[in-house]
Image: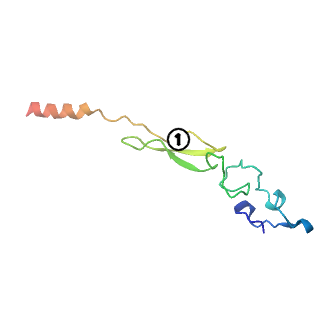
């Protein structure tokens, strides 16, 4: 068996006679094999023991974006083509002005 995880698991080395066991190639690894990672699909397609090296994100994955501090609401980004998309659903709500509460307190004091 070829000692590779995921995409390459189960591939069988060929006997090269006097040359010994031959290294596995794309034909042994199967259709998910890539000589150089480009799919960004969460798998080790080039069978080097590393998953999606060179990819900024994995296609179809989501991440939280924006801020949820104060009156803001976080959104989400989706990875497509190995790039994070726009932040969808993020909200920037305007906070209430502090003067509103000061004015109310001042009026009560003045009335009392």
Residue at the spot 44% in from the left edge and 39% down from the top edge: 91
Q: Residue at x 34, y 36 (%)?
A: 95
Give residue 46's position: percent from left, percent from top: 74, 54
- Furthest residue in direction right, as rendered: 18
| SS at mark 1 in the image | loop
Looking at the rendered image, the quarter that the N terminus falls into is: bottom right
Where is the C terminus found, in terms of image quarters? Answer: top left
Residue 78 left/right relative to 90: right
Left or right? Give the position of 64 relative to 92.
right
Colour setting: rainbow
Quarter of the view holding residue 50: bottom right
Residue positioned most to the front? 18
Task: Estimate the x, y position of residue 61 in percent, counting from the top left.
Answer: 59, 50
Residue 71 coordinates in the image, percent (x, y): 37, 41
80 lies above or below 110: below
Viewer-proximal residue, 20 or 32?
20
Q: Nearer the viewer, residue 8 or 87?
A: 8
Please determine whether, in this image, residue 90 is positioned above or below residue 51.
above
Image location of residue 93, percent across then percent down: 39, 37
Q: Is residue 106 left or right of residue 13?
A: left
Q: Residues within 10 Å of mark 1 (few under 14, many from 20)?
A: some
Q: Nearer the viewer, residue 48 or 17?
A: 17
**Viewer-nearest residue: 89 or 63:** 63
Which residue is the site of mark 1? 88
How many numbered callouts? 1
Q: Is residue 17 left or right of residue 9?
A: right
Residue at the image position 68 percent from the left and 58 percent from the top: 49
């Amino acid at each position: 068996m070829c000692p590779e995880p995921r995409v390459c698991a189960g591939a069988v080395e060929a006997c090269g006679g006097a040359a010994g066991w031959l290294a596995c190639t794309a034909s042994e690894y199967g259709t998910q094999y890539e000589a150089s990672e480009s799919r960004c699909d969460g798998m080790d397609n080039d069978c080097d023991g590393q998953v999606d090296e060179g990819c900024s994100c994995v296609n179809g994955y989501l991440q939280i974006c924006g801020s949820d501090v104060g009156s803001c609401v976080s959104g989400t980004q989706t990875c497509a083509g190995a790039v994070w998309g726009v932040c969808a659903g993020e909200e920037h709500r305007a906070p209430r002005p502090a003067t509103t509460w000061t004015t109310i307190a001042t009026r009560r004091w003045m009335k009392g």
